[in-house]
Amino acid sequence: MIKAVMMMNTQGKPRLAKFYDFLVRCLPVEKQQELIRGVFSVLSSRPENVSNFLEIDSLFGPDSRLVYKHYATLYFVLVFDGSENELAMLDLIQVLVETLDKCFSNVCELDIVFNYSKMHTVLDEIVFGGQVLETRSDEVMKAVEEISKSEAASNSISLVPKSVSGWRGGR
Amino acid sequence: MEQLKTIGRELAMGSQGGFGQSKEFLDLVKSIGEARSKAEEDRIVLSEIDILKRKLLEPDIPKRKMKEYIIRLVYIEMLGHDASFGYIHAVKMTHDDNLLLKRTGYLAVTLFLNEDHDLIILIVNTIQKDLRSDNYLVVCAALNAICRLINEETIPAVLPQVVDLLNHHKEAVRKKAIMALHRFHRKSPSSVSHLISNFRKRLCDNDPGVMGATLCPLFDLITEDVASYKDLVSSFVSILKQVTERRLPKSYDYHQMPAPFIQIKLLKIMALLGSGDKSASEIMYMVLGDLFRKCDSSTNIGNAILYECIRSISCIIPSPKLLEAAADAISKFLKSDSHNLKYMGIDGLGRLIKISPDIAEQHQLAVIDCLEDPDDTLKRKTFELLYKMTKSSNVEVIVDRMIDYMISINDNHYKTEIASRCVELAEQFAPSNQWFIQIMNKVFEHAGDLVNIKVAHNLMRLIAEGFGEDDDDADSKLRLSAVESYLQIMSEPKLPSLFLQVISWVLGEYGTADGKYSASYISGKLCDVADAYSSDETVKGYAVSALMKIYAFEIASGRKVDVLPECQSLIEELLASHSTDLQQRAYELQALLALDARAVESILPLDASCEDIEVDKDLSFLNGYIQQAIESGAQPYISERERSGMLETTDYHSQDHHEVPSHALRFEAYERPKPSSLRTQASTELVPVPEPSYYSEAHQPISTSSVSERESSEIKLRLDGVKQKWGRPSYQSSTSASSTPPQAANGTSSHPDVGVGSSSLKPRSSYESKKPEIDPEKQRLAASLFGGSSSSRSDRKSSSGGHKPAKGTASKPPKENPIPVQPPPDLLDFGEPTATSVTATDPFKELEGLMDSSSQDGGSTDVMGVLYSDAAPVTTTTSVDSLLSELSDSSKGNPGTYQSQTSKGPNSQEALEKDALVRQMGVNPTSQNPTLFKDLLG
């Protein structure tokens, strides 16, 4: 099971953090921040050209592993337990990044910051409830596009009349 | 008009791709991005929180605007600030019909709330409604929310709909419904136990994606209960076969591998099912063999599958052919330049080594490379492998390595782990006690606060027991060497408390034992310890007890004791200590100094910590005394059971009174006799000369219970005529005489030695059984880390012999085995001192270092020493060290400056607003809405 998905920049600012582990989810916000900081401090101390794996029992409990990948200014981090395969998780990060790349055509940190909800949409199509749901980035793209389309449609139909009625009611 | 304009602007912004944000949000992100310090960032976020609080209170917020606010709230919370004031708006937004808003609402809610949040109850209705929606995207959004928001109590409210969705026409929905059900199973297995068959059914789904999703819950279910899924073995195997034969649609390919994630899950499941099951394993041989042949080891995902195959093979009962294939795959991993693959290779090696122990042999050099690698993860994995392959023949090198690494790291979590591993290996495989003590000293010195206290007791016991044979000479040598090493170590500053306890105990027990050190020297050292660690009462207690023993031995041997002035002042200080324990020890010490040699010798006999103590449970030696007392009119002892039956003496009281000294104030009314206090009282009559055998067994509870036992059995209770009117006094006078015996116990406090002494009664540890291995001749022959391959090492040694000048002592009888093929040594490499670029490390250089150090080891002439002994180039270690210290620094420098300015507690305004909202939505969290609860509970 995947316990957490995190993205943070090289200065340690969290860009996206999603926890799936029941225990971690029930922690207060501050504790979750501590986890993120803890992960960052480990990552930032790793030299170049070493493996992408870490054992991270000290932060996420026994049998916790972490896989990370460093793209430009961003760390992509997956935390998971022994029921996942490290190399496969590395490829899952690859899938995520490829998909984001397709979404934003050449993804960069800013895209991720400013398209927060879309990021989550993409992630939710790939990882669902802590399990890998879909690994084909084309399929993910299709699903995400469908959502955007239908969101846009519902927007143009419902938003204006509703706002207008709200406006009338307000007067 | 104003409003219309805003709408226009929002629409314009919305058209920038549907996810556009307002300028304010962009500004916020930008300013936070440019913040120089955490404090500045906090300031920005706090002002943003103020703005949002104000804005959210405005009436008639346009929904578009509200969506934006909520995204900003999410952003704030991601940065670690409390956004709970806006949760209710996110909840409200999930009720919206507009998909965009609904999804935003769900997103925010899933990020804000956990399963047990109070507001969840307001969402359950919406989720129920959305699960029935015609729009599958709405259904998906609701399923997603379920996974993150539903707790045990609310599962029944949504369960029927989720089960219905397992047959939804959209495969995306079916997939998510399975995942949701799986999530329920994880959360509360009992809630979905009747639905497990659905997972089996979905395994046959037409859509491979749905089938793949089903494997996740099945994996969990099989982990819990293998036996009931054995019938699926052939199904899983045939699915895997079909996948590898590319029967799935091309779209499932990933980097030219057919559905790799499905393959990996299947392999994991097969590992579970084939474990210890020969017939199930045999069904798998074919497909596993195919996988090894087909897997493309040039891609990451191909290697992932290969690794998974290795794992499966290590779990099932493998065929020799598969083992061979797995070994080949591992050697490919280990030879790779990629650290990731090396890591997987080491891991695989660790798994396979349990089945075929010789497999590690061919990878010795690769393993050494990994051990020297700058990559900490790889290093740790390698230590794990070494830990798994430790035998009595290679334990010394491996443990030495581990300790060096342990010293070099700062991460307490891992330090604890590796320390406990060192101890475990040392206890299990120690070739000699001397070595064991050395290793323990190192572990204590560098990780003393992290190891279990039992380890310390074990060490003390070992020193006390010696070799476990009647070889007194060897024993005293061992002790002397322990004492010497401790006297040396003691001068170092800041030793861990546990280690000091061991040191004090050993010095007290054996410091003066063979006359090498004078009593005043040792006692001076002990005083130094007590002074230097004056805040640590346990250490002080040990030190005082040790002093007492030193003096006792002196007195007993008839020498005159000169109490050093610093000892005198220490004793005086402790006589007034706040700690009653220390006080008592000091008083005892003082009392002991005044006694004559004979008495002292019986109190503290020399080296008696592991004498077997015979406890006279019946205290028969007191029979005469009791008889006498009874004859002169004393009341017999009344056993506690009978007493409590009569007088309702509570346990609490009787326990309590062991501690209460007789002259202390009494706070209870004199209503009930307090039997146990009597014994304390009686102490004054009996103290001075305790039976010698008593000293170290002086356990209060034991003796008291034995008294009651005996009394109850031998002497009948005579209660008639005893008037209880005055309670305590009358009772006391009558029984005091008969209850005296345990007093001997009371005179001496329970010493730490007692624990050690009594533990010596346990059967001797496994050292004895290891005796044969200590034979150096045998050791030399058998010794090699990987067993059997000593030849290559000795050859390498002789070939490299000319290069290193300072290794004469290390030369050992070379083995006569044939010379394995060796790459010619790169001579130019030898001069280079640093070995930081590990992948390029010359194996010969490695061996040079290894041998060199083994010579420094005092010529521990075993060949095993050669390969793995302490040769870590210092540079590597230090770089790791500094790296880790950097790490801890950076974590320190990033203090959690979370400001709890906005409390999560309810404020009245918010409560009112919440109430209004709740009314408006027709969902009331109180019991005024019966239908909601009917849904939830029914």
Image (tube, grey):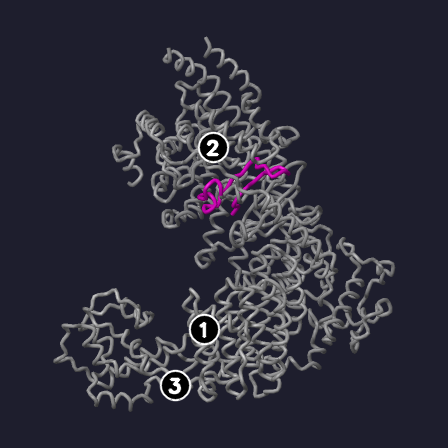
Label 1: element kind: helix
Badge 3 density bin: few <14, some 14–19, many ≥20, Cα 10 Å: few
As shown in the figure, which amino acid type bears the numbered disc 1? Ala
Give the distance between the C-alpha atoms of the residues marked 1 and 2, in whole angstroms. Answer: 67 Å
Q: Which mark is residue B856?
A: none
Residue in view at x 55 percent, y 41 percent: A5
Q: Nearer the viewer, mark 3 or mark 2?
A: 3
Gap in angstroms between the C-alphas marked 3 and 2: 79 Å
Name the chain under label 3.
B
Where is residue B873? Give x, y as percent.
75, 60
Earlier-in-chain disc, 1 versus 2: 2
Amino acid beneath label 2? Leu
User: Where does residue B395 sit, x and y in percent of width and height?
Assistant: 64, 71
Read off the residue under disc 1: B586
The chain containing the residue under callout 2 comes to: B
Label 3: state its secondary structure. Answer: loop
Name the image quarter holding the C terminus of chain B.
top left
Magenta highlight range: A1-30
Instruction: Quadrant for residue B594, please give it.
Output: bottom left
> Residue A6: x and y, percent?
56, 40
Left or right relative to B824: residue B288? left
C-alpha separation, residue under disc 1 versus residue under disc 3? 19 Å
**Please, which residue is most extreme toward the top here?**
B1
* Residue at image location 34% in from the left, 43% down from the top: B153
Residue at label 2? Answer: B107
